[in-house]
Image (cartoon, rainbow, N blue to C red):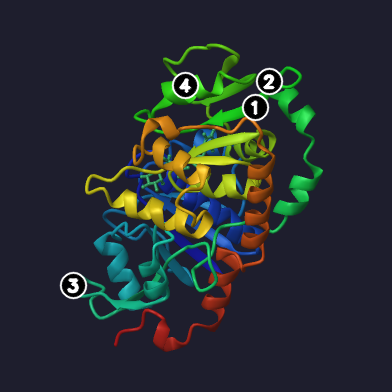
Amino acid sequence: MLWDLFCRVIDNHGDLGVTLRLARNLVERGQQVRLWVDDARALAWMAPVPSKCITIHAWPESEWPVAAVGDVVIETFGCALPEPVQARLARTPPLWLNLEYLSAEPYTLRSHRLPSPVMSGPARGLSKTFWYPGFVPGSGGLLREKELAQAQAEHDRAAFLTELGLQPRSGERLVSLFCYLHAPRQALLDRLSAEPTLLIGMGTCAEGLEARGQLRIRHLPWLDQATYDRLLWSCDVNVVRGEDSFVRAQWAGKPMLWHIYRQDDDAHAAKLQAYLDIRWPDRTSPVRLLWQAWNDLGPVAELDIPSDLQAWNEEARSWRTELSRQTDLCDQLLAFAETASPGSRAAPG
Ligand SMILES: Cc1cn([C@H]2C[C@H](O)[C@@H](COP(=O)(O)OP(=O)(O)O[C@H]3O[C@@H](C)[C@H](O)[C@@H](O)[C@H]3O)O2)c(=O)[nH]c1=O
């Protein structure tokens, strides 16, 4: 099948990062993908080696520049499709989906796979289906490569770290840091400095931070997506943010700390709690308190990284196992696309 994926880069790197992962997951399953994006600059570091099966196209603002529409059109994160595209869809309606943001909030399960009529514009009368990724059966699933477990089993941590020029000392914890700059980073570093730790600051995330106590800092430039994944597999604790790195840290199966994308109306607070409720439902769980503190939703005194990571490690691995048992997002999408009846396609009426 041919898939048209549409992506608008609002801010940061997650919009494109998620869309690229989806494109790659589809290609891995034998699909052809066209990726339409309004700002492809980050692909230079995220995906320096282009895939033959993914063609990159400028955002089609004023005309639909190719002959046919794909079998499936995916609008990511409600990026409104330009009118010429909508007009083209109205002529030969494909299966039209809107891939939503990842959340554990209960409303996502109610809304997942619901068709929604387009009320105005050239595509008026068509319908699009809402796809909600998630962590539990009944959700739209998580993006996961088919060969992920095997690649992890074959990963040579020592060789990989050497390739990156990272040389942790014996007994030193390796912590990767990818967060927004408003995080209580100094407080985190103070806590980490109580144990021998090498902190890897991604991009600009550790700018302005200094070594202290038993903590050393190394800065790395943005890595390509696959290399960043391997860094997550190689660290003892991963600090991640947004959406895509958050998922990747779960696949790494290591202790992790999520810096959630902050929303003006504080909607992120409910989103964080919903996730904590499925992963650490006990309100007194130290990890839950730590995550809340890191996200400015609890006292900073609770920002406490345990010195013994064993229990947290085991929890992270069993969480990964639980997630791996579920059908991943892309396999779910393919099954849906293959069986979608004409009524669930974007046909008028
Ligand atoms: C640190 C790093 C990240 N990456 C990738 C991983 C991800 O695909 C991408 C980062 O995206 P995220 O982890 O989602 O974090 P982000 O903060 O950049 O993106 C966020 O943007 C907001 C607009 C959205 O509302 C959020 O939900 C989220 O998408 O960059 C690399 O490829 N190399 C790197 O070195």
Q: Residue at x 61, y 61 (%)?
A: 323
Relative to 250, 165 lies left or right:
right
Distance of mark 4 from mark 1, alpha carbons? 14 Å
Q: Secondary structure at mark 1?
A: strand
Percent of width and height locating residue 70: 47, 68
Badge 4 is on which residue?
A: 206
Q: Amino acid at mark 3?
A: Ser
| Classed neighbour count for the residue bearing mark 3: other residues with Cα under 10 Å, few (<14), some (14–19), many (≥20) | few
* Quadrant (top left, top right, bottom left, bottom right) of the C terminus: bottom left
Q: Residue at x 72, y 26 (%)?
A: 161
Q: Which label's residue is closer to the chain start, 3 or 4?
A: 3
- For this orientation, the residue located farthest to the front is 284
Q: Residue at x 46, y 58 (%)?
A: 277
Q: Amino acid at mark 4?
A: Ala
Badge 2 is on which residue?
A: 166
Percent of width and height locating residue 83: 25, 63
Q: Is residue 156 above or below residue 336?
A: above
Badge 1 is on which residue?
A: 174
Q: Marks 2 and 4: CB-CB under 8 Å?
A: no
Determine if the C-beta at disc 1 is less than 8 A from ligand 1: no
Q: Secondary structure at mark 4?
A: loop
Relative to 105, 63 lies left or right:
left
Q: Amino acid at mark 2?
A: Leu
Badge 3 is on which residue?
A: 120
Q: Amino acid at mark 1?
A: Leu
Distance of mark 2 from mark 4, alpha carbons? 16 Å
Q: Which label's residue is closer to the chain start, 3 or 1?
A: 3
Q: Nearer the viewer, mark 2 or mark 3?
A: 2
Determine if the C-beta at disc 2 is less than 8 A from ligand 1: no
Snapshot quadrant of residue 130:
bottom left
Q: Secondary structure at mark 3?
A: loop
